[in-house]
Amino acid sequence: MRKLENIKINKSVFFALFVAIITITLCSRSSFLVPYNNWDDANSYFSMGKGLFNGKIIYRDIFDQKGPYLYLFYGIGYLLSNQTFFGVYLVEIVAAAFFFYGAYKILRRYADEAIAFSLLPVLGAVVYSSVSFWWGGSAEEFCLPFLVWPFYYFLFLIEKEEFEKKDDKKVLLTGICAGIVALIKFNILGFFAPWGIFLFLKLLLKKEYKGLLALCGWFFLGFLLPFLPWFIYFGLNNGLKDWYKAYIYYNVFVYADFSREEYTLYDKTYQLAKILYWLILENIRYFAFIILGVICYLADRNTKLLDKAGIVFLCSFTFLGIYIGGVELKYYSFPLTVFAVLGFCYLGKGIQKLLNKGPKRLLGKWQSAGILLTLLLSVGIMYFGSINTEAQTVKKEEHYLYRLQQLMEITEDTTLLNISSFDIGLYTVTGIVPNCYWFQTQTLPIEDVLVEQAEYMKQGKTDYVVARDYYPEVIREQYELIGEETDPLRDCKFYLFEKKEK
C-alpha cells in the first residue's frame, strides 16, 4: 500500500512540474522562446546575484533594495547560465512547480485527482498570463510558492477540531516560508499576520494552552531560521548596517509613500479602494476566481464563522501589506493570485458533483479527455493572453542588447556603468560584474545616486557607460559615444559610451 501511495505522489509532482514547464515557457521572458528578458528589474536582480557569487558583498559593495533570497535565486540562475536568462528560467520553473504542487494539494481537498489535474493548467494560465505576472522573474513570483503552502496548511489547520503533535511541523514550515518571504520582499508578510492570529484564537477558545505555546514557538523558530545564514554572511563581512539601511530603511522610510502626514485615513481608504477596483478590472481572469472562492467559502454551511473571518482577513491583510505604502506597480498584485486557488477548488467541487450524478463512464472519460482539453485551453489562454507573446517574435540578432554587446571589447577586466535607468541587461549579456556601488540609476529619491554616478564618470571609473533616453553632459569629459540602439517594443533609446584613450 505504501508503494502505491509513493507512486501517486510522484505522479502529482511530475504533473506539477510538467504544468510549470509549459506555463513558464509560454509566459515568461526568461524563456528560450524569447531572445532576452529585458525587464530592468530582473536584470538588476541578476547583476546582484552575479555579484553575490563573485565576491561582492550585496548592499555593501553593490546596491539594490530587494531581499537577499531573491539575489540568491538569481545567483543560482547565473551559475546555471552566466550570460543568459536560461538559468533563471529553470529557477522560475522550480518555483512554479512548488506552487502548482501546493495548489494541487488544496484542490484535492475538494475534488478527486483527475479533476485536480485538469484544473491545474487552467489555474496556471489565468495566473501566469495575467498582467501582474509582468515579464517574468519578479520578487512577487518567487514569493508565490512560499504562500501557497502556508495557505494549504491554514485551510487544513483551521478546519480541524483538534490540533495534534504532527501539526507542529506544518507550523514550523509556515514560519520558514514567512522568514523567506520576509527576506525576498517583506511587505508580502501581511499574509502571515491573520494566519497566526486566527489559529491562535482557535486554540485560545478551545483552551488548548499547550498548543498555543507550540504554535508560537514553532512559528517563530521557523521564521528565524532563514535569517541565520544572512546574519552570518553580513556579520562576517561587516555588512549588517548596510543590510539594514538598504533593505529596511530605504524601503520603509524612502520608497513608501503613505507614511507622510498629509495622508488622512479617508485618503488612504479611498486610494486603496481605487487601487483594488483597477486591479480587478485589469486582472479579471484570476480575480474572478478569487471572488468566486471567497464568496463560496463564506456561503459554505460547513464552514464555521471563525474560519470564514480567517479567509476574509487573510485576503485583506495580504492586500494591505502590499499597497499600504502607497506605491503601485503592475506586478505588485501577483501574490494575491494564491487566493485564486480557492475559486478553482469550488469549481472542482461543482464539476465533481455533476460527474457523480451522471453515468460512471462520464467520470472515467474525464480522466483523459478532461485533462487534454484543459491543457489545450490553457495553452490558448497563455499564448493569446500573455503580454510577453509579442517578445517571442524578436530575433536575437536584432535585439538591441546583442547589437550593443558587439560594439564592446570584452575582457575579464572590462567594467561598465548603467545610468539614467535600472539595469538594461548589458551587464548580463557581456558577463561584466558591476564594480560601482550605484551600478545603475535607482528610482529611489536619493540624491547620492546621481552625484556619485557623475563622480564615477568624471574619474573615468569604468571602461563603458550605457544610458537610456538621456545622459548628463559630464559624460563627455571622459567618454565618447560609440553606438545607439532602440527598443521598438518600448519606444526607448540607448546610448553606449567608451572611455577616451589618453
Image (cartoon, helix red, strand yellow):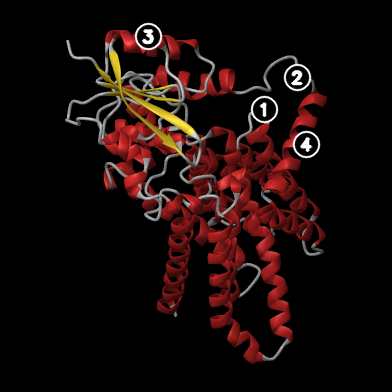
Residue 331: which quarter of the image?
top right
Horizontal arrangement in the rendering, residue 326 relative to residue 414 (left or right): right
Circles 1 and 3 in contact, beta carbons < 8 Å: no
Q: Amino acid at mark 3?
A: Val
In this view, 226 is above or below 281: above
**Judging from the image, what secondary structure is the residue with disc 3 in?**
helix
Q: Nearer the viewer, residue 33 or 14?
A: 33
Disc 1 and disc 4: Cα gap in Å?
12 Å
**Location of mark 1 (residue):** 326
**Judging from the image, what secondary structure is the residue with disc 1 in?**
loop
**Location of mark 2 (residue):** 263
Q: Position of residue 353 (x, y in %)?
A: 72, 78
Circles 2 and 1 in contact, beta carbons < 8 Å: yes
**Location of mark 4 (residue):** 273
Q: Which callout, 3 or 4, points to the residue nearer the camera?
A: 3
Disc 2 and disc 1: Cα gap in Å?
10 Å
Q: Mark 4 or mark 2, which has the lower sequence index? A: 2
Circles 3 and 4 in contact, beta carbons < 8 Å: no
**Judging from the image, what secondary structure is the residue with disc 2 in?**
loop
User: Is residue 120 visible in the rendered structure shown here?
Assistant: no
Disc 3 and disc 4: Cα gap in Å?
45 Å
Disc 4 and disc 2: Cα gap in Å?
15 Å
Horizontal arrangement in the rendering, residue 321 relative to residue 496 (left or right): right
Q: Amino acid at mark 2?
A: Tyr
CA neighbours of label 4 inside 10 A, class few (<14), some (14 to 19), many (20+):
few
**Judging from the image, what secondary structure is the residue with disc 4 in?**
helix
Q: Position of residue 320 (x, y in %)?
A: 69, 35
Q: Mark 1 or mark 4, which has the lower sequence index? A: 4
**Location of mark 3 (residue):** 474
CA neighbours of label 1 inside 10 A, class few (<14), some (14 to 19), many (20+):
some
Q: Mark 1 or mark 3, which has the lower sequence index? A: 1
